Amino acid sequence: MSASIGIAFFPEHSDTPETLMNLADSAMYEVKKSSKNGFCIYHAPIR
Protein backbone atom coordinates (compact mmCIF):
# COMPACT_ATOMS: atom_id res chain seq x y z
CA MET A 1 0.00 0.00 0.00
CA SER A 2 1.23 3.51 -0.75
CA ALA A 3 -0.07 7.04 -0.39
CA SER A 4 0.16 10.12 -2.59
CA ILE A 5 -0.72 13.34 -0.78
CA GLY A 6 -1.24 16.82 -2.20
CA ILE A 7 -1.13 19.81 0.13
CA ALA A 8 -2.46 23.34 -0.34
CA PHE A 9 -2.75 25.97 2.39
CA PHE A 10 -5.60 28.31 3.31
CA PRO A 11 -5.51 31.31 2.75
CA GLU A 12 -2.01 31.34 1.21
CA HIS A 13 -3.04 29.41 -1.92
CA SER A 14 -6.79 30.03 -2.08
CA ASP A 15 -9.66 31.47 -0.10
CA THR A 16 -12.36 29.12 -1.43
CA PRO A 17 -12.73 25.44 -0.51
CA GLU A 18 -13.27 24.35 -4.11
CA THR A 19 -10.11 25.99 -5.42
CA LEU A 20 -8.10 24.79 -2.44
CA MET A 21 -9.14 21.19 -3.16
CA ASN A 22 -8.29 21.57 -6.86
CA LEU A 23 -4.82 22.87 -6.04
CA ALA A 24 -4.20 20.04 -3.56
CA ASP A 25 -5.37 17.61 -6.23
CA SER A 26 -2.87 19.08 -8.70
CA ALA A 27 -0.08 18.65 -6.16
CA MET A 28 -1.13 15.04 -5.57
CA TYR A 29 -0.89 14.25 -9.30
CA GLU A 30 2.66 15.64 -9.32
CA VAL A 31 3.54 13.00 -6.71
CA LYS A 32 1.83 10.28 -8.74
CA LYS A 33 3.87 11.25 -11.83
CA SER A 34 7.17 10.91 -10.00
CA SER A 35 7.01 8.16 -7.41
CA LYS A 36 3.44 7.26 -6.39
CA ASN A 37 4.47 7.36 -2.74
CA GLY A 38 4.99 10.68 -1.00
CA PHE A 39 3.66 14.20 -0.74
CA CYS A 40 3.85 17.51 -2.57
CA ILE A 41 3.03 21.03 -1.43
CA TYR A 42 1.36 23.17 -4.09
CA HIS A 43 3.52 25.96 -5.53
CA ALA A 44 2.03 28.63 -7.76
CA PRO A 45 3.53 28.75 -11.26
CA ILE A 46 6.13 31.46 -11.82
CA ARG A 47 4.94 34.02 -14.35
Image: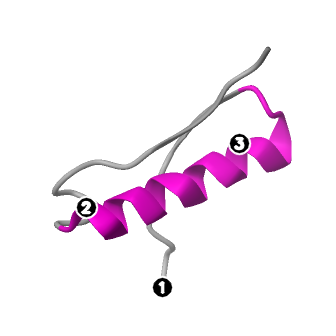
Q: Position of residue 23 (x, y in %)?
A: 45, 62
Q: CA distance from mark 3 to mark 1?
A: 22 Å
Q: Nearer the viewer, mark 3 or mark 2?
A: 2
Residue 37 vertical placement versus 23 (above, below): above
Residue at image mark 1: 47
Q: Residues within 10 Å of mark 2 (few under 14, many from 20)?
A: few
Residue at 16% over, 66% down: 15
- 32 magenta-colored: yes
Determine the secondary structure under disc 2. helix
Q: Position of residue 2 (x, y in %)?
A: 76, 19
Between disc 3 and disc 2, whose residue precedes?
2
Between disc 3 and disc 1, whose residue precedes?
3
Q: Which portion, as a residue range, is magenta?
A: 16-37
Residue at image mark 3: 31
Q: Position of residue 24 (x, y in %)?
A: 47, 52
| Residue lying farthest to the top in this orientation | 1
Residue at 20% over, 52% down: 10
Residue at image mark 2: 17
